[in-house]
Amino acid sequence: MWTSTLILIGRRITLVGGCRAAVRAVLAALIAALTGVALAQVGESAPDNGFTVARFDTDAYKQPASVLSYQESKMFMLGRSHFKRRWIAPITFNGEWGLGPTFIQTRCSECHINNGRGMPPASADEQLSTMLVRLSLPGSDEHGGPQADPNYGDQFQNNALQAQEVDLRYARMFVPAEAALYLDWEDHSVSFADGEQVTLRKPQLRIEDLAFGPLGEGAMFSLRNTPPLIGLGLLEAVSEETVLEIAQAQAEHGVNGRPNYVWDAINKQPALGRFGWKANTPSLMQQTAAAFLGDLGVTSWVFRAQNCPPVQIACQNQDPANDPEIIDADMDDFELWLRTLAAPAPRDVDDPQVKQGKNLFNQAGCNVCHVPELTTAREYPAFPKLANRTFRAYTDLLLHDMGEGLADGRPDYLAGGRDWRTTPLWGLGLSETVNGSTALLHDGRARNVAEAILWHGGEAQASREAFRNMPKAEREALVKFVESI
Ligand code: HEC
Ligand code: HEC
């Protein structure tokens, strides 16, 4: 039985004609029964799970789940306003004290514009502003995570408090930004089987004005675009068991999805990684705290120390605004807000082209990694309303070797230099409406869905080839389906 099941979820469907769909459905149900995981199922429309909302305009990524109590709605609104709050230096006005000393942006929403994705700079002389660069040296830290550079840490801050913002009585000198970060692009062209050409572009990071001397020996970099923030509570509430079952089901037909295990800085133990492009963060609370520290320079109860490596004297001399700089209640608002931000419902589900695209998506094996449907844990004490919800994010939360073309060569816990977490695809088609960005993949190199697929390699190579070999009309249908998810 397994053999025919596996062939069916895999790339080649050898069954014929009308009975194909029926047999597929039976087998899909069987897999679901055997593994508890609906690998082969593709959603028709939005599940009525209380965390999916039919809103398709520029506010599509900003909606609260429909199941919130009055109290929860109030916290949601507070979380939303903290996200837009501007952080400033302790001696200036018009914001919350605590920014820096080094940082990338002054508020969360400057990168996650309208809760959506970021984009690469428009020209080679413009610095990165809605993306970030992780950095590490060979080896690992005491928890198996990336080994920080002693002078620059594990992420560049290309901004710092300016002279007029620093209290010179205490700091005695203003704080330099760690570096200036730019991108150059390398183009190459690939062709579809029917001869149509596409130009793909790959970013080359250019680091200038290093303020604290050369980087450590063998420094590795990872350029990361800002991802959209939708439906993350559902992803946090999927049980580890479900994720491991998917990995097992994939292993049985040649795809090597692997969980990342990372350091949970809150519970002080290893935990399943879920968030970030390499699944290097276990929870929304930790992700928020890490973003506050790394992106804004704001300390919290999770990460209490300012981000100033020993060599950065001016940074160290700058007093924090408070200890911690963001109060615990605000962090709770953030957590609730992120947990309950709804995902947009799929669109055009009855469009014949979309339906055709859905079948092609399965035939090309996209659904093996972009698993259409997941269900959250049966019980979820952290936020009971998220328990037992079925949703369609099109991810497996697992890492996959995506080949040399997408590699950053920088390990992140168990994620190797070619590994990335399967990106959820929901809401992708609304990205341009939300904030104008269509920059896909971890470093924003793909300008549309077709380019993103053409970059797939490694474990996804057969899928990419299936797409590359499709006639134009089929490629268009598949892309249209992905944009409808
Ligand atoms: C400099 C731009 C930038 C700023 C400012 C920023 N983020 Fe992010 N955010 C990112 C990037 C880039 C990632 C992906 C990180 C990775 O892969 O390691 C990310 C990831 C996330 C994720 C995980 C999303 C997912 O799908 O895995 C959450 C949640 C998040 N950010 C929340 C916040 C919050 C809350 C703030 C404000 C405290 C914030 N971000 C500020 C760029 C930014
Ligand atoms: C082996 C697992 C695997 C398969 C099979 C696969 N993908 Fe992916 N997909 C990924 C991973 C991992 C990423 C993230 C790669 C990165 O950012 O470098 C990704 C990223 C994407 C993105 C970009 C999403 C974003 O928001 O940036 C799209 C679109 C996409 N995949 C569509 C598809 C389609 C369509 C297919 C089938 C033709 C497919 N994928 C097959 C694993 C897979």
Image (tube, rainbow, N blue to C red):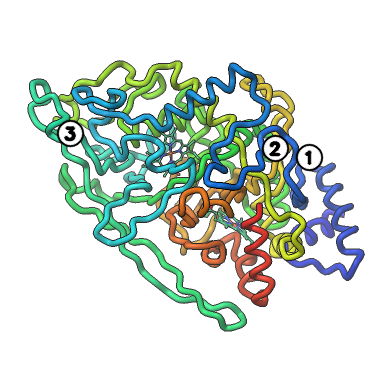
> Is 263 above or below relative to 185?
above
Q: Earlier in the sequence, mark 1 or mark 2?
A: 1
Q: Label 1, label 2: how many angstroms apart (C-alpha)? A: 8 Å
Is the Cβ of the residue at disc 3 closer than 8 Å to that at disc 2? no
> Is 311 above or below relative to 420?
above
Q: Secondary structure at mark 3?
A: loop
The kind of residue tagged 2 is Thr
Q: Nearer the viewer, residue 39 or 58?
A: 58
Q: Nearer the viewer, residue 413 or 159?
A: 159
Q: Which residue is mark 3?
A: 312
The kind of residue tagged 3 is Gln
Is the Cβ of the residue at disc 1 closer than 8 Å to that at disc 2? yes
Q: Which residue is mark 2?
A: 242
Query: Visible in this render: residue 176?
Result: yes
Q: Earlier in the sequence, mark 1 or mark 3?
A: 1
Residue 5's quadrant in the figure?
Answer: bottom right
Please state if 106 lies on the left or on the right of 381 as rendered.
Answer: left
Q: Earlier in the sequence, mark 3 or mark 2?
A: 2
Q: Secondary structure at mark 2?
A: helix
The kind of residue tagged 1 is Gly
Q: Is mark 2 within 8 Å of ligand 2?
A: no
Around disc 1, counting alpha carbons within 10 Å, would you say few (fewer than 14), some (14 to 19), or many (20 or more)?
A: some
What residue is shown at x 35% (from left), y 39% (from top)?
Answer: 147
Q: Which residue is mark 1?
A: 36
